Image (tube, rainbow, N blue to C red):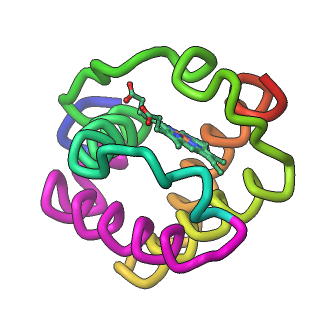
Amino acid sequence: MSESDSLYAQIGGQEAVEAVVDDFYDKVLDDPLLQPYFEDTDMQALFAHQVQFVSAVAGGPVDYKGDDMRSAHEGMGITDEAFDQVAEYLAAAMRENGVPEDDIETVIAEVDALRDDVVGV
Ligand code: HEM
């Protein structure tokens, strides 16, 4: 797949990814199950990392520069339930921003592949 027909390009590049991440975090931070995990987090730094991360997963010309997933989530006690909720909000945010269902499925499959690095580590 060339960069120009990557999922990243199809969904509208950096601007579209930022809109998705923005809506995604509104949902996450509104949820009482998830709020406690993010209490001490510098949201601006996390937002920047998350945009890079989603862009890289979607095949964009952005290299993810954060910690690996396991070290980033180690010791947080993240449950399967919390993970599922986060994945659900990411899918909903993509849907609200007009990302086609096929592409949403592709991104969620990539995210689900990271479950073992995020849950119970
Ligand atoms: C769906 C899979 C997930 C992905 C792809 C993901 C991705 C990321 C990324 C890229 C970072 C930034 C790492 C860095 O700053 O170097 C991060 C940090 C973080 N994640 Fe996740 N995450 C996922 C699931 C979750 C879940 C389910 C929770 C909690 C319910 C969570 C809570 C956090 C918190 C609190 C931080 C910030 C750590 C800090 O304060 O530095 N993540 N995550």
- Which is nearer the eye, 3 or 91? 91
Q: Is residue 17 above or below residue 56?
A: below
Image x and y of residue 104, in percent = 55, 61
Q: Any magenta on residue 41?
A: no
Image x and y of residue 78, in percent = 75, 42
Q: Any magenta on residue 24?
A: yes
Give the residues drawn in magenta, as a range: 6-33
**For residue 8, side relative to residue 85 (left or right):** left
**For residue 29, side relative to residue 98 (left or right):** right
Q: Residue at x 31, y 23 (%)?
A: 64
Q: Main secondary structure of the magenta part?
A: helix
**Picture quarter containing residue 81?**
bottom right
Q: Residue furthest front?
A: 40
Q: Residue at x 37, y 80 (%)?
A: 98
Number of marks in picture: 0
Image x and y of residue 75, in percent = 70, 25
**For residue 89, side relative to residue 115 (left or right):** left
Q: Residue at x 63, y 18 (%)?
A: 70
Q: In which quadrant is the C terminus drawn?
A: top right
Q: Residue at x 30, y 44 (%)?
A: 42
Q: In which quadrant is the N terminus drawn?
A: top left
